[in-house]
Amino acid sequence: MAIVGAGPVGLAVAIDLALRGVATVVLDDNDRLPAGSRAICWAKRTLEIFDRLGVAGPMVDRGVTWKVGRLFHGARQVCAFDLLPEAGHRMPAFINLPQHEVERLLVARCADFPGLIDLRWCHRVVGVTPEDAGVAARVEAPDGAYDLVADYLIACDGARSPVRGLLGLAFAGQAFEERFLIADVEMKADFPAERWFWFEPPFHGGQSALLHKQPDDIYRIDLQLGPDADPAEEMRPERIIPRVRAMVGDRPFRLVWTSVYTFQCRRLARFRHGRVIFAGDSAHVVSPFGARGGNGGIQDADNLAWKLALVVQGRAPAALLDSYDEERGRGADENILNSARATTFMTPKSAMEHLFRQAVLDLAVDHAFARRLVNSGRLSLPCSLAGLSPQTPAEPGAPGLVAPGTPCPDAPLDDGFLLDHLGQGFTLLAVGDTVVPAETGLPLLRLPAGGVVAQRYGAGALYLIRPDQHVAARFPAGADAAAIRRAHRRALGETAYD
Ligand SMILES: Cc1cc2nc3c(=O)[nH]c(=O)nc-3n(C[C@H](O)[C@H](O)[C@H](O)COP(=O)(O)OP(=O)(O)OC[C@H]3O[C@@H](n4cnc5c(N)ncnc54)[C@H](O)[C@@H]3O)c2cc1C
């Protein structure tokens, strides 16, 4: 199997496949990991996936944990939100950790699979030829060009995806004209580990601003510049330093990394093209507000790897890969919708849109209904896969609380946390003494019908959990082995629901 791109998504796919015994060659045209920080916010679901891949521990230890966001209008706080008000989860709502550090930890994890992950830096893919039984890739490398033939090629080659271009695929969507300055600034300050977002702040008239804390006294600052800003001019330190000083006050600081960017919301119509499959930014892009790009890409990896492994090992039909397209297509649509809505709210185009925003921000101070309309980027959450073809809908009255298509909520157990006990394959999860038929061939995880598990899953429930920790089915009381096998076959893409 070939993976093009050793960004977070390509590396996550490679590790996940290696955990399932599938060998990959990972090709990246860079000679090293990039230094600029790009993504910083990694969401709870991503951290749960990283934990399954064996890399979350050092990320959480090193990252800045946060869960509270505050929204300001001018100098006044409009509202605050808590992204994880309940206890009983191993992973925090978010950590802030620069993307290059996340990638470095993923690369280090790849080294744990010497016979399975062949990571090749400075290997640029310049040609892709889909064939009936595989994909041929032309690769340029320091020691000369060569051809690589793989059964599948996973294109994780980023927003500009050369593989997408080589196949002539359209990347349809919307480009936004608004320009933003992004600056990572090192300074001693006592801003809390929270997300602070300002509409029309006193220090940056008429625009918006965002502040996030990272490790080592580094802060991420985003400043809206407007559509007419000249990027070359705005990148000059003489322009940046006064803007930052107006925001952080008269204290010493150092610019670590700066960039001026615009953003786009685009996606491929289909993520699977035979034996070439797109994941991450090559498949879809969104604005950074909401932290949905990298987090969405890691969910692609989570969804794709177990399916690919089962298909190449001959344990599921190739049709299973179409469910990747279906499920992650929904995720991409949801992320694009959220991103586009946030952009409209953040950058009102007409006097009427501006008036609406003023009214919402004024009302939001005292009224909950208006708070729901304030949008500075809804932060990344996993999308529900409910109703899509691999899931077996729960029959009315089936005991339990979690709907098929939902990622399993974590819960504390006497010996760790629930997600730690799910393993890498399909699992039956029973809560309490519900009867579980023998001879399903599936491992059983039986949990006590009390405490947080029962509150989150419901006493007496029986679930089929997929390898990516999503509920595939929730069975009625007394379900027999045939019903469980049917749901399992459906989750494997072997049968359609009838
Ligand atoms: C300013 C900014 C802030 C952001 N903040 C966040 C955030 O807080 N949270 C979040 O979730 N997301 C954020 N994002 C989005 C996030 O950075 C991307 O979604 C993420 O990098 C996508 O990962 P990827 O692995 O798909 O692609 P990339 O990280 O782009 O990796 C693609 C890799 O493919 C390689 N490659 C390209 N072409 C070839 C070729 N021909 N041959 C071989 N290799 C090739 C590249 O060298 C690169 O290493 C942000 C983005 C920006 C720009």
Image (tube, grey):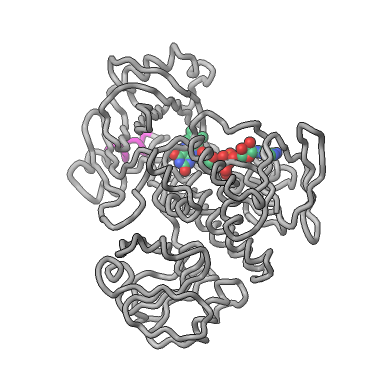
Which quadrant: the N terminus?
Answer: bottom right
Up-down: is 482 above or below 337?
Answer: below
Any part of residue 200 in sight? yes
Up-down: is 99 above or below 224?
Answer: below
Hey, which quadrant is residue 185 in on the image? top left
Up-down: is 398 above or below 191?
Answer: below
Residue 410 location, x and y as percent?
Answer: 36, 61
- Using the image as rendered, state which of residue 23 and residue 497 is in the foreground: 23
- Residue at 34% from the left image edge and 48% from the top image edge: 93
Ligand 1 position by quadrant: top right
- Horizontal side of residue 458 vs 436, given as left or right: left
- Using the image as rendered, state which of residue 282 and residue 205 is in the foreground: 282
Any part of residue 287 in sight? no
- Residue at 66% from the left image edge and 39% from the top image edge: 28
Residue 362 location, x and y as percent?
Answer: 23, 38
- Residue at 41% from the left image edge and 73% from the top image edge: 445
